[in-house]
Amino acid sequence: MKRTFAILALVLATATGLKAQQGGGYNESVVVRGSYNPEIEPSEKLTFPAVITDTLSRIEHAFSYNITPHRLKALYEPARIKAARIVGEPATKLYNNYLRLGMGNYWSPLADLYWSSTRDREKTYGVRINHRSSWGSLPDHGPNHMNQTGVTLFGKYIVADKLQLSTDLGYEHDHNLYYGFSDSTLQAVLGNTRDDISTADYRASYNVASWNIGLRNMQLDPNKLGYSAGLHIDDLWATYGRNQFNMTLAGDIHYGFNLLDQYRGVAYLAATWEGYSYRRLGAKGEPLGYSAAASTDTARANRNIVRLTPYADFMLGGLHFHAGLTTAWDGFSSSDVAFHFYPDVTVSKKLMNDNLVLSLGATGGLDANTLNTLRLVNPYIAPDAEQSATSHYDFTGHARWTLSRKLEANAEVSYSMADNDLIFMLDPAYSLNNVYQTFYLSDNRLTIGADIAFVNDELLTLRAGGHYYSYKYTGLGPFGVRAELYRPDWDAFVRASANYNDKWFFHVEAQLLGKMQADQGEVLPMRYGINAEVEYRHNRALSFFLKMDNLAFQRYYLWANYPSQRGLFVGGLTYTIPHK
């Protein structure tokens, strides 16, 4: 019974396994009851390998897809960012005014005032006032007073961003004394002492009223016509019956052009007319010491100069050219009009990666020596000083070499040929030998100069240089005197500026001026001057300064018989009112 049960169970198990291998889904069970007799039957050996069959079915999928882009619109929209304001930018505060006040020894006040309108796209206007004077005295020479005072009103207006109009109205008052005589000379020549005379007897006073008006178009395109024009008027009246009226008209037009279809250039045409009317009333007297008979006649003279200058600026083959010609009509030197032609040519070239710049030039011009010009060159001229125009031709060569970012050197040589070149001599008509007359001669002058500069940003600046001069005259000057009077053979200078922490500013300058030939065989000694200035800036609005001139305390002479003060010190402050 047990054996029969075992055989039956084996048969059922085998059948069930075969069905499962065939993929059937049967789920049946057999319950056998009875005795079981196990018995092992002999079996044959299997001679083929077993094969494993995967019963899991694989399903193949045909998959396809398409990409359709869609722009996503953000639901969040950021708010606009307001323009940032930079702290300390120029728009926060405008320093449109400037006040400088000082006082020095020899009772020497100093005042400068500047004020202008605030930022505006169309208009600007303002005022400038300056004053400087000295009321000291010199041993054995008495008072050496001087005064310089000026005021200027200015304005500018731009019309529709196309035309700029500008104007200024000014007044200037200067006066000085013909103090170039000693107490002993005054006593010996005139028999007077200082107490017997007044400073009004030898004072020269000048007053100048001027007006300028100009216009120019705002065209920046060189291919379109550009132009400018100006009118200058000044009226000078001075002591001893002198008066000079001047009117000057000047203008230019310019236009761009192509050169060889490769280079750009701009052509100009400039024109100037200067008209002068001079009058002197002889009845107004002369400075102290005039030994000739005083004239009561009125002297009159009308003088004119006309200039016409066409020129062009352009680049060609790496060279920068300024090429032109000046034609001048000289109706100033005499009643007969003379014509002059002057070159106006300059050629420059950059080499060594722009570190070396070489230039050559041939220029010339006609310069009017008016009463206003003469008194600024030599304040001790005679009331009837002769006026003429100097014609000159100048040939120059210049080299600038940038040795490094902080070091630069310059060298120049020039040769000038002048007709009616201006010189000064003591006028023998004045017995005190303190008044100068003008003379005009022809001469040639050679000038050789060089300088070297070291610049360390804004912290330190050093510059040193000098010039050598050589003159050749056609004959002797008036009264058989050598013509190189009051002209040194050489000069030299050293300048240094320093900035410490943007609070302390220092400037020192030393000058050397060679010996000069003076009247009557006298030789003026070499001048060595040292000037210095110190400024402390408390803040952007307030600073303090100290100016020191002639620290070598030399009693030097620039004109014979006119000694200088030994030292001048002026201290003061500068104040600016910020304006929002």
Image (tube, grey):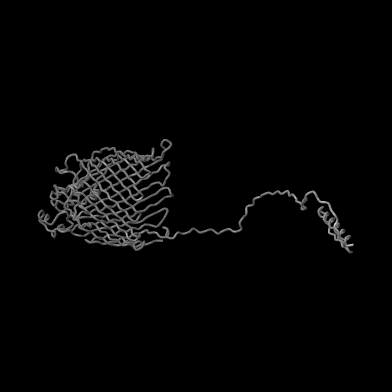
Residue 404 or 527: which is nearer the viewer? 404
Which x, y percent locates residue 24? Answer: 83, 54
Quadrant of the image occupied by residue 572: bottom left
Compared with residue 485, is residue 567 higher up or lower down, i.e. above or below?
Answer: below
Indicate the quadrant where residue 529 lies.
Answer: bottom left
Q: Position of residue 182 (x, y in %)?
A: 14, 55
| Quadrant in the picture for the C terminus | bottom left
Residue 399, picture quadrant: top left
Q: Is residue 70 visible in this depiction of the protein?
A: yes
Q: Compare residues 154 and 113 and report the one nearer the observer.
A: 113
Residue that protrudes farthest toward the top in the picture:
260
- Of 19 and 104, nearer the camera is 19
Tell me: 131 left or right of 478: right
In percent of width and height, residue 466 lies at 25, 48
Q: Position of residue 23 (x, y in %)?
A: 81, 53
> Which residue is rendered at x = 73% and y = 48% of the image?
62
Q: Between 500 and 41, which is closer to the camera in this rendering?
A: 41
